[in-house]
Image (cartoon, rainbow, N blue to C red):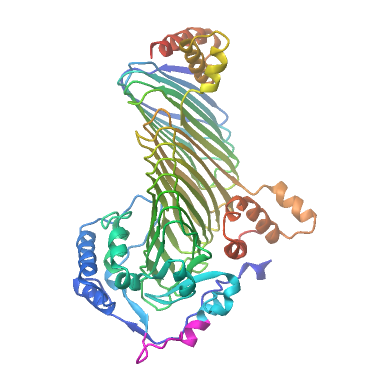
Amino acid sequence: MEGLADKEYEHGFVTDVEQEFIPKGLNEDIIRLISAKKEEPEWMLEFRLEAFRRWQKMPLPKWAHLDIPEIDFQDIIYYAAPKKAEDRPKEIDPELAKTFDKLGIPLHEREALAGVAVDAVFDSVSVTTTFRSALAEKGIIFCSFSEAVKEHPDLVRKYLASVVPVGDNFYAALNSAVFSDGSFVYIPKGVRCPMELSSYFRINAAGTGQFERTLIVADEGSYVSYMEGCTAPMRDENQLHAAVVEIIVEKDAEVKYSTVQNWYPGDKEGKGGIYNFVTKRGICKGSGSHLSWTQVETGSAITWKYPSTILKGDNSSSEFYSVAVTNNYQQADTGTKMIHIGRNTRSRIISKGISAGRSQNSYRGLVKMMPGADNARNFSQCDSLLIGDKCGAHTFPYIENANKTAVVEHEATTSKISEDQLFYCNQRGIGPEEAVGLIVNGYAREVLAKLPMEFAVEAQKLLQVSLEGSVG
Amino acid sequence: MTEVIIVSDGQLVRNIEVQSGQRKDMVLLVYPGVSCDVKLDVRLAGEGAEANIYGAYVCGGEERVKIAVDMHHDLPHCNSRQLFKGIAGGTSKVDFYGKIIVVQDAQRTEAYQENHNLLLSDGAKVDTKPQLEIYADDVKCSHGATIGRLNEEEQFYMRSRGITLEDARVLQMISFIAPVLENIPEDEREAVAAKFEEAVRSI
C-alpha cells in the first residue's frame, strides 16, 4: 500500500535543449521584443500593446474559491524558445523529439496509424506540425499561430479576439499582450476533417510562463475534433500558464474540443506546480451549430478555467463534460458558462469533481437564458466525490432565466465512496487502491466515454495515478 | 412546533440556532404584491440538530423577491432540508440564494436543498444560486434548482376533459406549490391554501 502511494508525476523530466530567452519582466519594450522575434506585422504589435495597456489597469480577479499566492508578474520570462541552429534545420532537434516521444506524441508521420495530426508547442514556440500536406489537400489550415499571422492574416484578423475580447478578463488581457504561440485551425465550408487534430503543450524552461493562443474556425457545415494535452517538468517554483482558446462555429458546423490537462500539480507538500489560468470560449454563431467541450483535469497546482459557449445561432447546441481530480494541496475552480441567445438552443452540462488529500475542488457555472432564447433548454448535473476528510468539494452554479418558454434544470450531489462499495470489491480480492480506481472510473464514465479513443485510455490511467495514495 | 411566517414588505433577517437534539421547522410565505429581502442564517450548533425550512412565493406584478439562506452544519450528525417553490409573473424579479456549508468535522451530515420556479411572463426574471461548500467527506448533500414553465401536455389532458385553460393553469400552480404548504400545521393549512388559490387566480 505504502509503496503504491508514492507514484510520482511521470512527466516530470527536463529536456536539455539550448534555450533562447528574453529578459525577465513585462513592459512595452518586452512586448515589442516578442513581436520582433516573431517577425510580426504592425497590426499584431498594436493588438498586443493595446492589450497590455488595458491589462495594466485591470485588477486581479479574486472571486474564485481559490487561495492564490501573490504572483510577481515582473519575475516571469515571457518568451523562451529552443535556440535555432544557424539555419533552423528542417528536422526536429533529436532531444526535443525524444521529449515528445517520452510524452507519447506521434510527432513523426511514421505514426500515421495513430491518425492524429499534432501541433506541438514547446515553451513558447510551436515546434512542428504533422500531416500538413494531407490536410492542405482538403483546404484545411492547421498550423502554428505565428505562421497563421504571416500566411493567413485576413482570417486571423477577422476572428482573433472576436470571442474573447482583449479586455475580457485579467489573464486573457495578459495573454493577448504576450502570447507566444499556439495553434490555428480553419476548416473550410462543408469539409469534414478526416483526422483528429491535436496539440501538445509543454513548459520546459525554468522561470518561464506559457501563454498560448488557439483559434479554431469551423466554417459552414464543417466538422473537426480537436484535442489538447499538456505536461510540465517538476520544479519547486510555481509557473504560470495563461492561455486563451477561441472557437468560432458557423452554420451547421460542429466542433469537438477535448482536453487532457496534466500540468505538474506540485509535490505532496504543495510545493511547486503550475498555475493554470485559462480562458476558453466558443461561439455557436450560425444556426444548427454544435460545440462540445470535454475536459479531464488532473494536473496543475491551481486551476481557474471555465470553457464557455455563447449559443447565438437558432437551434444551436453545446455540451460540457468535465472530470476534475484534485489531490494533495491542489486547488481547482472550474466549470462552464452557457449563454443562450438564440431560439431553441440547447445545452447540457455534466461535471464530475473528485477531491482527495487536502485539496479543494469547486464547480462554478453560469446558465443564462436571454429574453430571446425561446424554447431554450439546459440540463446540468454536477457531482462531487470526496475521498478523505481533509478535502473540500464545492458547487457554485448561477442560473438566470428571463424567458418564460426556456427551461433550466440543475442538480448537484456530494458524497463519498461508500463503505459498501469498497467492501464489495475487497471481498472479491480487489485491493483498496484498485477498488477506488475502479469506482472513480465508473463514476466518471459518462465523461470519459465522450473522449476520442486516443485520449480515453490515457485519461483513465491518469485518474488512477492522480488518486494513488489517497486511501488507506 | 412549525413556525409559519407571512412575509411582509421590506427586510426580514432571522438568525436561528438549533441546539443538540432539537428541531426547527419553518415555513415562509410570500403573497402577491409583497417585495421582500429575506435573510436567513441557520446554524446547526449541536449534535443531532435538525432544521427544515420551506418557502413559497407568488409574484404577479412588479415585486422584487429576494431570499437568501445560509445553512451551517457545524457539528456531526445534523440534518437539514430546504424546499423553496415559487411562481413569477408580470414584471417581477425573483432572486434565490442558498448555501449549505459543512465544516470539516461535521461528519454524517445530511443536507438537501431544492428551489423550483415557474416563469409565467416575458417580463419576469428568476435568478437562482444554490451553492454547496463542503469540507467533510462522510456526507450526503445535494441541491437541485429548476426554472421552467407550465407543462402543456398536462394542460391538454385537462382541457380534453372539459376543464378550461384558466382552471387547468390554476390547478397546475396549486399542485406546484402544494409540497410546501403540506408542511403547515393542519389547523392553519386550509386558510393558507385558500389564500394561495386566490393568489394564483389573480396572476
Q: Main secondary structure of the magenta part?
A: loop
Instruction: Name which quarter of the figure residue A121 lies in.
Output: bottom left
Q: Position of residue A147 (x, y in %)?
A: 34, 73
- Name the quarter where the C terminus of chain B is drawn: top left
Q: Position of residue B50 (x, y in %)?
A: 55, 30
> In the rendered view, would you say A129 is above or below B64?
below
Would residue A229 be seen by someone viewing this image from the given angle? no
> In the rendered view, would you say A274 is above or below A318?
below
Query: Does A20 appear in magenta?
Result: no
Q: Position of residue A188 (x, y in %)?
A: 41, 60
The residue furthest bottom is A86
The residue furthest right is A428
Instruction: Name which quarter of the figure residue A463 lies in.
Output: bottom right
Q: Nearer the viewer, residue A281 or A336?
A: A281
Q: Tally the marks.
A: 0
> In the rendered view, would you say A2 is above or below B69?
below
> In the rendered view, would you say A287 is above or below A409?
below
Q: Residue at 54% across / 20% down in the picture?
A: B179
Q: Residue at 58% across / 76% down in the picture?
A: A111
- Which stretch appears magenta? A83-98
Q: Position of residue A159 (x, y in %)?
A: 31, 58
Q: Nearer the viewer, residue A40 or A320?
A: A40
Q: Nearer the viewer, residue A283 or B70?
A: A283
Query: Does A88 appear in magenta?
Result: yes
Q: Residue at 49% across / 49% down in the picture?
A: A320
Would residue A364 be seen by someone viewing this image from the given angle? yes
Q: In the rendered view, does A458 fall on the left or right side of B166?
A: right
